[in-house]
Amino acid sequence: MPLLSLFWAMLWFFMFIIWIWLLIAIFVDIFRSHDMGGFAKAMWVLFVIVLPFLGVLVYVIARGHGMQERQLKEAAEAQKMQQDYIKEVAGSDSTADQLTKLAALHDSGKLTDDEFASQKAKLLA
């Protein structure tokens, strides 16, 4: 029976890890929530600490939908910030914009005809 004991111990270990993850997620959600005041947050924290199983169950039932909405909102904001950063770093100049700038440099005399032709070929390639 040592193999069965090993599987049983592994099951309890993973359940403990899931429990810790759930507690952390709930505490993060309590403090991230802007629709609750400080007193309500304190009461939820006390409820979850004093009666952990009942507190977590009641919190997920009562505020689970809002928990999901806050996570989705945060994920959307993070994705928007990432897209803005990528646009900023990569630059958004199109080929036409680059050709216009190149022509302006050529017209102002900063580029010779050969330099203009080679840069134009690079852009169009």
Image (cartoon, rainbow, N blue to C red):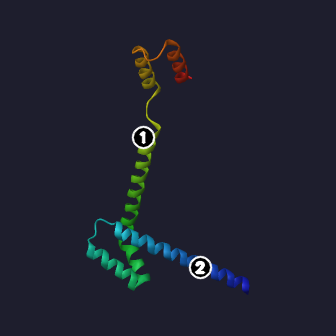
Q: Which mark is residue 13?
A: 2
Please rate how many residues cluster around mark 1, counting C-alpha atoms within 10 Å: few if below 14, some from 14 to 19, many from 20: few
Please rate how many residues cluster around mark 2, counting C-alpha atoms within 10 Å: few if below 14, some from 14 to 19, many from 20: few
* Looking at the image, residue 20 lies above or below residue 106: below
On the image, the x and y values in percent for residue 115 come to 52, 17
* Tag nearer the camera, 1 or 2: 1
At x 38% / y 78%, what residue is drawn?
58
Which residue lies most toward the bottom here? 1
In the picture, measured across the screen, residue 72 lies left or right of residue 117, that is: left
From the viewer's side, name the closer residue of 105 and 100.
105
Residue 74 found in image quarter: bottom left
The quadrant the C terminus occupies is top right
From the viewer's side, name the closer residue of 36 and 123.
123
At x 42% / y 56%, what residue is drawn?
75
Callout 1 secondary element: helix
Callout 2 secondary element: helix
Can you identify the residue that label 1 sits on? 88
On the image, the x and y values in percent for residue 10 come to 63, 79
Query: What amino acid does circle 1 point to?
Result: Glu
On the image, the x and y values in percent for residue 123 come to 52, 23
